[in-house]
Amino acid sequence: MTLIKHEWKQGRAAFLIWTGSIGLLLGFCIFLFPEMKGQMEDVSALFASMGSFTAAFGMDRLNISSLTGFYAVECGSVLGLGGAFFASLTAAGLLSKEERGKTAEFLLAHPLSRTKIVTAKFLSLLSQIAAMNLALLGLAAASMLLIGEEIPVKELLLLHLAYFLMQLELAGICFGLSAFLQRSGAGIALGLAAMTYFLNLISNITESAHFLRPFTPFAYCEGADIVEKGGLNLPLVFWGLLWGAVGIAAAYAHYCRKDIAV
Amino acid sequence: MEAIRTDALTKTYGKARGILDLNLSVREEEFFGFIGPNGAGKSTTIRTLLGFLRPTSGSASLLGMDLRTGREEILALTGYLPSEVAFYPGMRVGELLELSARLRREARRPASLLPHRREKTSGRRNTSRSDPLRTDETARRLEQLCSAGALCERLRLDPGRRIDELSFGNRKKAGIVCALQHHPRLLILDEPTSGLDPLMQREFFDILDEFHQAGATIFLSSHILSEIQRHCTRAAILREGRVIACGEVGSLMKTGARRVTFRGQAPISALSGLKDLHRHDGAASFLYDGELNRLLSVLAAGDIRDLSITEPDLEEVFLHYYTDGGEDPAESGKDAPLQTISGRNEP
């Protein structure tokens, strides 16, 4: 518990900045909705005629003049990318920062098994991601109430669940990478999040690229799919959780055996 | 029981040498010195003993527990001060000490830490393990000595200061308090005095002496030989990853080599076994490890106005080993001041 609290303290500033920034953008998007609502039908028609660009963002299947459609497309991008960056960055530094910051000697001189250290760090990561998602969910719901719209509870919960799972997947993979790194993993983390985002855009454009979907967590966060089907694409979620689990298992397997560079 | 025992402990990094077939035996309640120049393998040895590095081969046990199976129990009883201390940014000293204490409190704690049993009388240590009053009194004294507050006060370390603002020396002090505040039975110190001013060094060694008198084993790795000479009872010398000498510090110093200093002229170039030659203001000084009769005849052939022949100090003994080009003193047939060379040194 002490180590989990310590990790929270260490990551407090980053957590507040990321949650605050994503929350601010999310709220800003929602508050724009009433003003844009009237113009949205024209915009929807415009977006629907943009060919593969439209398909890439799933706007061919969503009506963005409704709050649900608007939230899934506009706010989904903010929440999806922002959350992915936060989860990846946080996870990629968790284990490697001890060697990078030369604090590994301090930490490992205490009577803690490496398994306990990895577990505590992972739990702190999990709790930070969960806390951020709960805060953003609450903020989104409150913003919807404030603009006088009815909250689309089911869709909102499903969308946020999908983003949460996507962040867990990326966090799991980056956590595994962090066990192998002795330097900052920020570049790798941001690169991975951005790459998987674009991978999803590519897989949306043409059916021949659909084979890429199990390799990108953004595939099961597709707002159009979630709203249309009223549920998550479970096979894709399974693939995502599998990659995340592989990352976490790699973190345990490698960190518990590796020579710690100090 | 041995506080530290290694059997053919080896750590290599690919083809690079770390430590090779290291056999060490440190008795419990001993003040043991571990000497070697930079790169000899001292820190690798310590990091392997603490489980930061996995041994390539061989085994190690600390406080009677195998390192592979009892690492957490060992660490609960051990205090470690690294040569370069680094802490988390944004913390205050007090928060860091509290974090360290909490991490230890949460861990499974073995039944006993320091034995708190010894009193020093007339320069001899008197063990009175059956006297409960004395045990309580010493335990109380040690409790006070080990408290983070008392240690900070003695080392003049302000717990309210931010770690980021501390000088290297003050960070070292924070490291010392972290290593000592849980009353460890075994203290492993890697170059502990680097960064400390002379006054703090003296205070630090006073604290170590008090710990030692209370029953702690101290393993002091250093290349400052005067520290080893002054405080340690036994020491091991490490060269290129191997223990080349181990024994009582006094015995280690009893080398056949002599420090010869003279004023005047003498054909000393005819001498073999001559090292560390310095000439200054008409005086010559060198370490001589050859036949004394030969030395005297060479000096007698010259014009000597002043002469002194003394035993070298530990620093010179150390140089004697390290300027040998890897030659093993035992094999070279010289006076071996060692109880054992390149092998286990049973106490």
Image: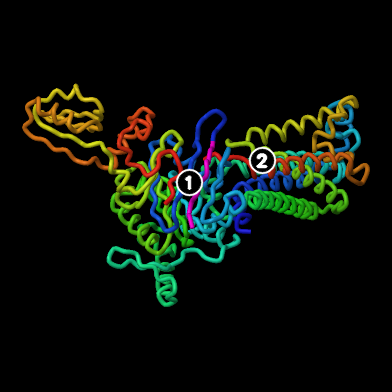
Query: Is B122 within the magenta?
Result: no
In the displayed structure, does residue B165 sit left or right of residue A86? left
What's drawn in magenta, residue-wise?
B1-11
Instruction: Answer with the quarter of the image where residue A206 lies.
Output: top right
Which labelled disc corresponds to residue A247? none
Q: Nearer the viewer, residue A53 or A123?
A: A123
Chain to which the residue tagged by mark 2 belongs = A
Chain to which the residue tagged by mark 1 belongs = B
Is residue B160 in sight in this rendering?
Answer: no
Q: Residues within 10 Å of mark 1 (few under 14, many from 20)?
A: many
Say above or below: B60 vs B28.
above
Q: Residues within 10 Å of mark 2 (few under 14, many from 20)?
A: some
Which labelled disc corresponds to residue B86? 1
Query: Is B5 within the magenta?
Result: yes
Q: Amino acid at mark 1?
A: Ala
In the displayed structure, does residue B325 sit left or right of residue A215? left
Give the SS element for disc 2. helix
Q: Position of residue A24 (x, y in %)?
A: 69, 47
Q: Nearer the viewer, residue B200 or A71?
A: B200
Q: Residue at the location (69% across, 52% down)?
A: A123
Q: Residue at the location (25% across, 29% down)?
A: B275
- Name the front one of labels 2 and 1: 2
* Residue matched to label 2: A254
Quadrant position of the N terminus of chain A in the picture: bottom right
Q: Position of residue A98 (x, y in %)?
A: 56, 44
Q: Nearer the viewer, residue A130 or A259?
A: A259
Q: Amino acid at mark 2?
A: His
Q: Position of residue A161 (x, y in %)?
A: 81, 48
Q: Residue at the location (40% across, 53% down)?
A: B173
Query: Which residue of the protein is positioned furthest toward the bottom in this rendering?
Result: B133
Between marks 2 and 1, how big is the CA–CA gap?
24 Å
